[in-house]
Image (cartoon, rainbow, N blue to C red):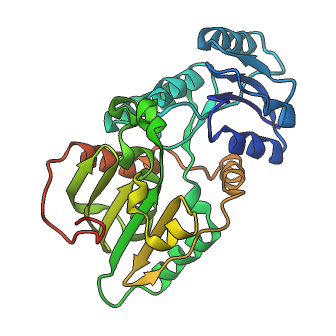
Amino acid sequence: MKNFALTGVAGYIAPRHLQAIHETGNRLVAAVDVHDSVGILDRYFPETSFFTQFERYDRHAEKLRFAGHPDKIDIVSICSPNYLHDAHIRHALRIGADALCEKPLVLNPWNLDALEEMEREHQKKVFNVLQLRVHPSLMALKQELAENPPAKRPSVQLSYITSRGLWYHYSWKGDLSKSGGIATNIGIHFFDMLMWFFGAPRQSHVHLREPHKMGGFLELEGADVSWYLSLDREDLPESAKQNGQPTFRSITIDGREIEFSGGFTDLHTRVYEETLAGRGFGLADARPSIELVHGIRTAPLSSKGAKSPFIR
């Protein structure tokens, strides 16, 4: 049984981590968030020590470490806003714990270099939640592509439209310096998946970059990808609007739709199981997508490569 701490426990994704810690038979001994709407702790871990000030939580974690306490923290789960991930990972390593962090692991590639040094210094590991890599349908597709490579270079289209209201742009998510923009905040899941399938990027071109939508082209080692990401409800296909669906997600390979709309309820638990079994996704797994999205948000606009049909 491992002792976990959790940063960002009042956030959107935290319940999946709480469920995963509970379902894998472990304990949550400490949690921190500047917001105190954390009644969900009663469902899983009512005895957790909760803090609204990171400094007090940090002092508590250090006390557990040096006192040889039975509640000494083994792993820190990090669900805080993107711009805090790097600092919270460093905190985990300094208190002698491993870190299990949501995506994006960090915002900038050079942050990974420093974390590699800290891993060696503290003899602890940093793991990333790459839940699409444990999705049964996508694992099956990965195996299919490996065993039966396409006869010709495939053409891939990625389209992800997820409606967000005005609040999004006034929160940390709408601040490029804090979220990394939509390619980092909502696209990194899919970019990691595509590179997992088709290899590293040879070229990347950005066709459209606005605060609420982006699109571009990727030449990967094994496929050509046109991609589009949007927070704009008006971009939803009419069928989605008529059915009241706020999100449209589509990935096609040579016109073949990849279906993976289901099977998401226990993916975090699967990631926890893999991590606890010594098969977690580390810094080397996270690096390619972080380097890619950093390039996407800093590259000049280009007209090269096939454009998504959503870019008019």
Residue 41 in the figure: left or right of residue 127: right
The residue depicted at 59 percent of the width and 55 percent of the height is 131
Out of 69 and 108, give the one closest to the viewer.
Answer: 108
Percent of width and height locating residue 280: 60, 49
In the rendered view, tell whether residue 74 sits above or below residue 156: above
In the rendered view, tell whether residue 63 sits above or below residue 25: above
In the rendered view, tell whether residue 142 sits above or below residue 167: below
**Picture quadrant of residue 27:** top right
Residue 174 in the figure: left or right of residue 211: right
Percent of width and height locating residue 223: 31, 74
Percent of width and height locating residue 231: 41, 51
What quarter of the picture does the N terminus occupy? top right
The residue depicted at 56 percent of the width and 25 percent of the height is 93
Out of 122 and 69, give the one closest to the viewer.
Answer: 69
Residue 59 in the figure: left or right of residue 70: left
The residue depicted at 56 percent of the width and 63 percent of the height is 245
Percent of width and height locating residue 18: 74, 39
In the rendered view, tell whether residue 20 sits above or below residue 302: above
**Picture quadrant of residue 80:** top right
What quarter of the picture does the C terminus occupy? bottom left
- Residue 106 is at least partly visible in this image: no
The residue depicted at 57 percent of the width and 47 percent of the height is 129
- Residue 305 is at least partly visible in this image: yes
